[in-house]
Image (cartoon, rainbow, N blue to C red):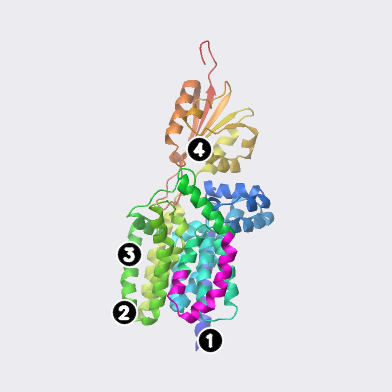
């Protein structure tokens, strides 16, 4: 009987993972790279030595980039090639949700939680992005799973714990919060469990020292110069958690329904099933360590950002999966599939609307019109990397990157054609307006590209900016002009 149940669970998990992969592969190259993905490409082009000698918390940890360096040596730098590793990590992350759900609650909870993770638009979004967030998600969950296996004294679990934890710590700057979470879990465990994990935990901490020093240095820089290190991260307010829940689950009403089910179900589980209490405590610890602690620190130094907290999504879905798994057998399948359908509803919007920067479209409009000798003015200068990915000939032109209002007064050449590329990253509004005024006074401007007029904005967007490109012909100088 047990063998039959094991086989059935294996087939269900295989089906879940196949659906997970299909949803993440679908439309993988339907949109071009946005800024951060272009930064990944740019750093990969700098070579392995540059990545190992020039990394800090703003560039994430080095492990993802080293893995991507080896991958691109084999498969190149195309959009699909750059994003496929994130697809793989996304599938592994859903598998890790199953493993952790089975360990914390039961096999049925793991299967339901992994099914909910398979259709989650937040997880799908970052599984289709050439950034390290799904790698961080997978490794963090795997680290927690191995820690629980160390507690149980399972053979070989210590090696798995050290490898997965160190890999997670060297992937993302939120590593200290993963360590804090594990300390909380250790503190609430038995003395025997703590003794079993003491040696691998100390070994992990010792090996983390180099990365810890880098993160501490960057955090100190952020304290001293908040306008420099991660200045685009703003201080969260009391309503931040509501906005994050909406982003995690795809819409406000889906978030409201899911959280209500999770909270009421947690109370029901706590009272009815004593065996679920340890799992509920660990899920709560994940939310506290990965969201509320960064939220508190961010009241002093802003460090909280949605995609950094991606592990919180797993905690929410694990609890929901545990609740569904305890519904009576006759109602469990209908209730679980109804909830799965509700959680999947935001995918229609996700797949039918744009949610990334329109650099591919902008470059396609620009390329046939540019001539040798044309000048470029880029504001913000951050747009140079994604533009260069789609228009590599940019390096053959004179490019000006004004950083302040004073620079804007001297960004126009004496003659020729000027292409002004405006991308509204961070607080560039006043500077862009000033450059437009300078161009109007010095040039005749005609052709323009505006991404906002050519594409709809996805309400599930995690990040997107408006791109404007204007072609200007410099007016001839006359007597008296300066």
Task: Please state the horizontal and vertical placement of residue 200, each as a whole percent of the image.
Answer: 57, 73
Which disc is residue 257 wearing? 3
Give the SS element for disc 4.
loop
Q: CA distance from mark 2 to mark 3?
A: 21 Å
Residue 205 falls inside the magenta stretch: yes
Residue sitting at the far top: 479
Q: Which residue lies under the disc numbered 4?
A: 380
Quadrant of the rendered image containing residue 276:
bottom left
Badge 2 local density, few (<14 within 10 Å), some, or many (20+)? few
Q: Which residues are magenta?
A: 183-209
Query: Which is more toward the observer, 321 or 45?
Result: 45
Residue located 57% across and 61% down the image: 209
Q: CA distance from mark 4 to mark 2?
A: 55 Å
Task: Please state the horizontal and vertical placement of residue 413, each as a whole percent of the image.
Answer: 57, 24
Which disc is residue 3 wearing? 1
Badge 1 local density, few (<14 within 10 Å), some, or many (20+)? few
Q: Are marks 4 and 2 in contact (CB under 8 Å)?
A: no
Instruction: Please report whichever mark, 4 or 3, sits nearer to the chain's N-terminal start.
Output: 3
Give the SS element for disc 3.
helix
Residue located 69% across and 54% down the image: 73
Instruction: Please report whichever mark, 2 or 3, sits nearer to the chain's N-terminal start.
Output: 3
Task: Please state the horizontal and vertical placement of residue 452, each as a whole percent of the image.
Answer: 44, 40
Give the SS element for disc 1.
helix
Residue 185 drawn above or below residue 60: below
Residue located 31% across and 74% down the image: 267
Task: Please state the horizontal and vertical placement of residue 157, each as a whole percent of the image.
Answer: 57, 76
Q: CA distance from mark 4 to mark 3?
A: 40 Å
Q: Nearer the viewer, mark 2 or mark 3?
A: 2
Residue 178 falls inside the magenta stretch: no
């Amino acid at each position: 009987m047990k063998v039959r149940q094991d086989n059935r669970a294996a087939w269900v998990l295989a089906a879940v993972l196949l659906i997970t992969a299909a949803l993440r592969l679908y439309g993988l190259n339907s949109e071009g790279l946005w800024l951060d993905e272009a930064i990944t490409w740019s750093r990969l082009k700098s070579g392995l030595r540059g990545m190992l000698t020039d990394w800090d918390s703003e560039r994430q940890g080095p492990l993802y980039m080293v893995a991507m360096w080896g991958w691109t040596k084999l498969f190149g730098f195309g959009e699909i090639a750059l994003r496929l590793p994130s697809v793989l990590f996304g599938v592994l992350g859903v598998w890790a949700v199953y493993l952790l759900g089975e360990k914390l609650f039961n096999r049925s909870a793991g299967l339901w939680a992994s099914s909910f993770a398979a259709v989650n638009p937040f997880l799908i979004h970052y599984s289709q992005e050439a950034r390290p967030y799904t790698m961080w998600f997978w490794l963090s969950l795997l680290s927690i799973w191995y820690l629980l296996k160390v507690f149980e004294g399972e053979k070989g679990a210590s090696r798995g714990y050290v490898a997965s934890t160190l890999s997670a710590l060297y992937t993302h700057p939120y590593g200290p919060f993963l360590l804090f979470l594990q300390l909380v879990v250790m503190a609430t465990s038995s003395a025997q469990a703590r003794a079993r994990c003491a040696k691998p935990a100390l070994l992990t901490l010792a090996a983390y020292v180099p990365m810890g020093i880098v993160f501490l240095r960057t955090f100190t820089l952020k304290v001293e110069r908040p306008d420099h290190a991660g200045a685009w991260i703003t201080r969260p307010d009391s309503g931040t958690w509501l906005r994050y829940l909406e982003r995690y689950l795809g819409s406000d009403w889906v978030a409201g329904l899911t959280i209500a089910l999770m909270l009421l179900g947690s109370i029901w589980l706590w009272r009815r099933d004593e065996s679920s209490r340890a799992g509920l405590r660990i899920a709560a610890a994940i939310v506290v360590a990965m969201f509320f602690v960064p939220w508190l620190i961010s009241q002093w130094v802003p460090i909280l950002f949605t995609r950094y907290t991606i592990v919180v999504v797993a905690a929410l879905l694990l609890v929901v999966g545990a609740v569904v798994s305890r519904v009576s057998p006759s109602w469990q399948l209908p209730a679980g599939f109804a909830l799965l359908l509700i959680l999947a509803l935001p995918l229609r919007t996700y797949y039918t609307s744009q949610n990334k920067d329109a650099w591919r479209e902008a470059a396609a409009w620009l390329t046939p019109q540019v001539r040798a000798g044309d000048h470029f003015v880029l504001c913000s200068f951050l747009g140079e990397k994604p533009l260069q990915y789609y228009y590599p000939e940019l390096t053959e032109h004179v490019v000006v990157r004004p950083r302040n209002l004073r620079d804007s007064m001297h960004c126009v050449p004496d003659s020729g054609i000027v292409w002004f590329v405006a991308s509204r990253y961070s607080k560039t509004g006043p500077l862009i307006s000033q450059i437009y005024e300078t161009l109007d006074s010095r040039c005749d401007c005609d052709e323009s590209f505006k991404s906002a007029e050519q594409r709809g904005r996805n309400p599930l967007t995690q990040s997107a900016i408006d791109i404007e490109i204007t072609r200007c012909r410099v007016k001839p100088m006359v007597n008296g002009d300066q």
